[in-house]
Image (tube, coloured by chain):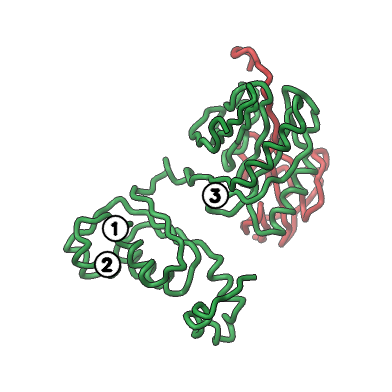
Amino acid sequence: MIDFTEEQIQRYSRHILLQDVGVEGQEKIMNARVLVVGAGGLGAPVSLYLAAAGIGRIGIVDADVVDLSNLQRQVIHFTKDVGVPKVESAKEKILAINPDVKVDTYHEFLYSGNALDIKMTINDDVIQQIIRQAEKDAPEESCGYLLGTADGQVTENYWMENIDHSEEHFSFAPKDQFAALKYARSKNLKILANWHSHPASPSRPSQEDLRLANDPTIRYAILSLLDGKHNLNSFRIVDGQVVDKEIHLANG
Amino acid sequence: MAKIYVNGDAQEVSLPLNVTELIKTVLVENPEMVSVQVNEEFAEREDWDNIQLKENDKVDFLFFMGGGSAVYDLNDK
């Protein structure tokens, strides 16, 4: 439940008055996230309206810069913006309309090669929690799911039993997996990644990790406790190959 | 045609259709690497052939999750 400020109540009063929107509807709008692909003829007005309505987080993807010939229809860009990346120009206007909106800019083209590379970020308290869990379980490997929002923000560690209870292997029980899925759905979260610890080896997938990484839609995070240091990287693995790596914690 | 939900997304399918057949259509590769629940009830693999799907069924599948730091011979696939 969002506590609306006086200013927000006033700002969104014409939504809140509508019977079909109301406070609950406005809350849904403020919790919503939208990715706008292209800040041009359509993306420009769409972004302005989304910002005005109070969408919580707006991402904009566009590799282009503003040209004078754009201004006749791409109404988010102004004369002073000619030569500026469209994502920057759009972000400025969105924030001018509604400073409550969080704006993510992607100054690139969207194509099949980067569409799945939405970056994953892990809240600090979640990282600390999985370190504590892994240290408690060491020398056995520890594991879990990372749950979060569709835009890649991990907000929860979901403990999973390592049914192998092994120092060099882990497995999830299928029924535990469905329990995790049910929990995630009940909190409106997605399973963004699984993680396991390497108590005595580096934070990179072993041959066994690669062999068993069957799900191309999630990331595989590995927390290394090697030499008393904490390293946490996550990987996207397709057909047994690492196609993307992110560093979440280095020598922490 | 009937509407069923696969991992939360609505899909149009033609009946009759059992779980084995559905999993083969949505997962061309690695159908053996998933666990399935139908309407939040775990479906044992040996029952997949016998579970006939119907309108509005909710089917979820999750990939087997495992791995480990064990060092394997690179040639040992």
The dot on residue B16 is none
Counting every numbered tag in the picture gives 3
Q: Output the letter for the chain in red.
A: B
Where is residue A50 shown, x and y percent of the image?
Answer: 43, 70
Q: Residues at marks 3 and 2, common chain?
A: yes
Task: Please name the residue that numbered disc 2 is placed on.
Answer: A74
Q: Mark 1 or 3 closer to N-term?
A: 1
Tell me what hue chain A is rendered in. Answer: green
Where is residue B27 shown, x and y percent of the image?
Answer: 62, 41
Q: Is residue B31 left or right of residue A20?
A: right
- Please name the residue shown 35% across and 61% down the image: A91
Q: Is residue B62 left or right of residue A4?
A: right
Please identify the quarter of the rendering in which residue A157 is found.
top right
Tell me the amino acid under the disc marked 2.
Answer: Gln
Q: Nearer the viewer, residue B60 or A220?
A: A220
Tell me the amino acid under the disc marked 1.
Answer: Lys
Evaluate whether residue A29 shows in this view: yes
Name the element at disc 3.
loop
